[in-house]
Image (tube, rainbow, N blue to C red):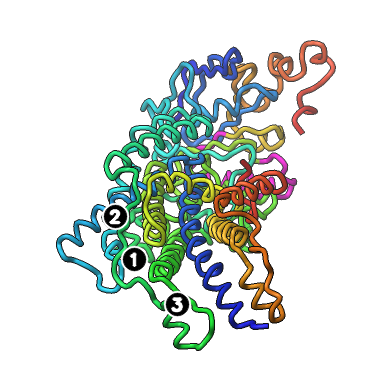
Amino acid sequence: MDILNAIVVLLNFVIIPATAYGAQLALGALGVTLIYGILRFSNFAHGDTMAFGTMIVILCTWGLQAAGVTLGPLPTALLALPVGIALTALLLMGTDRAVYRFYRRQKAKPVVYVIASLGVMFIMNGIVRFIIGVDDQRFDDGERFLISVRRFRDLTGLEEGLGIRTSQAITVVVALIAMVALFWFLNRTRTGKSMRAFSDNEDLALLSGINPERVVMITWLIVAALATTAGTLYGLDKAFKPFTYFQLLLPIFAAAIVGGLGNPVGAILGGFLIAFSEVGVTYAFRKVVGYLGPEGWEPAGMMQLLSTDYKFAVSFTILLIVLLFRPTGIMKGKTI
Amino acid sequence: MIEVRDLHKHFGGFHAVDGASLRIETGSITGLIGPNGAGKTTLFNVIAGMLAPTQGQVFMDGEDITGLAPHRLFAKGLLRTFQIAHEFHSMTCRENLMMVPPGQSGESLWNTWFGRKRIADEDRALRAKADEVLEFLTISHLADHPAGMISGGQKKLLELGRTMMVDAKIVFLDEVGAGVNRTLLKTIGDAIVRLNRERGYTFCVIEHDMDFIGRLCDPVIVMSEGRVLAQGTIDQIKANEQVIEAYLGTGLKNKAKLEGIGA
């Protein structure tokens, strides 16, 4: 039995990666849930919004790197993030003006918005691939590790090492800041309260001192910030590829729905739930079990429930179970 | 003064409002009665900008307000309440009231970051006003309760309270007494009269309780099948043959008296 090594392996391969991935999903799901709560439709273009924002950040990062501007040990992308957010906000507000506002005036049914957002998705998809191409892009720089595996082993003398990548640490810190800022905004400021009021009861909100167009614009602005941040963090942690971002739509929607659509706290919980399930189910637990069992009892099999190729099946299954047994999600969001 | 001219609202082949014309004089408490399905609430929805009319016009003090968005009408001092009370369920009763006044400086993102002092001052004034309104409506003890949790009657009071947060000109009350007990209904009636006398609010009230209408309203307008059937004082209305017929149908009208219907 070697509990310490088992814990280190588990931390290194499951808990830390899942926490980072969960934070990225949570930020994505927050955007989806805000749009659902306030504009009342499922925005299928969200994955590609993230891709667009990240693309701007990447282009800007390359520009900064070429000009010799870096953030030292931190990735330069953090410096480019505000530019990405600003341009994505412009894109989303433009889309709202050109597409969604028309349907809002018609008081269209939610399903019409969903189909419209599908069209927006294809267009954004095309724009991103046209500008940056379909290939993998790497844009992380600065210090790669907060603690590297070897350094951890040297420090502790344990057999197993624990590596924390800078991108993982940054993901968690940035996500935490974004979430705190969002909740402060929604609960403490008048604009945030207007948004909540709009989400609670649109009819009544229209009969109060709330300007609906302004609420909608501010929602898009916040969604742009959340989507770009989520996309950039995911890209820093893994890599940027437009198709991957499109695929992220499934775990993000699963997270938002599991948590309860329209409920921000639920979106965060859902993000981590999906991430931990996905990583937990597709990780080979052979080593962990080997350390926990008596000497020489290490299992011959991989102790892996599903191959990583099937990771999307995890979100899909969770989504199905939730929709069947608790359609309002963990935190009692709106019924779909 | 609100003037409705030949208003139509059709839902497909169904004519919910079918050529209604009426006037609501400034300073009056006008009652709007009629059998279920007479088109009263649809008329309210069209006047308040929730529905676009199929045909016809609405004027407020001579100005054409047909089809204006609800928040624009709200800014002009035209307010309404709902048949089934609406509230921001996740917010407290006090917050519900504080949401009402338009043009708050906290609405702008710029002020959220750079105008903190102004927002705080405004907030304090609003809070005091909200507490005053809650006191007036005898529900001070509910100030910090989530509005989704209070009873149906209390929600009706809260709806009335919303109209007191701004200087309204005209308030449309849709079945303010539905599901409210007698004592609470008296509180609501007193509040309406006080607001009318002290603050000069004009009211238009939809209500099925004839005692309530009789005590409060002059004139009373009767709607039936999407049109205005009659208008006059409550006594004139009660004596009107057509009105009795609309409520009871021709077969019953000789047997029954209108007094028995509403309550």
Residue A93, given in percent of the width and then of the height, sits at 33, 42
**Label 3 to label 2: alpha-carbon separation:** 29 Å
Image point 61% across, 59% down: which residue? A277
Q: Is residue A139 magenta?
A: no
Q: Is residue B88 visible?
A: no
Amino acid at pointer 3: Val
Point out which mark residue A149 bears.
Answer: 3
Residue A136, given in percent of the width and then of the height, sits at 35, 51
- Mark 3 vs mark 1: in front: 3
- Outermost residue to the right: B255
Give the answer, above or below, for where B117 lies relative to A99: below
**Subunit bearing disc 2:** A
Amino acid at pointer 2: Val
Q: Is residue B205 visible?
A: yes
Q: Earlier in the sequence, mark 3 or mark 2?
A: 2
A42 left or right of B261?
Answer: left
Q: Secondary structure at mark 3?
A: helix
Residue A247, given in percent of the width and then of the height, sits at 48, 45
- Magenta-colored span: B177-204
Number of numbered markers: 3
Binning the other alpha carbons within 10 Å of mark 3 as few (below 14), some (14 to 19) or many (20 upward) gives: some
Residue on which disc 2 sits: A57
Residue on which disc 1 sits: B116
Q: Secondary structure at mark 2?
A: helix
**Subunit bearing disc 1:** B
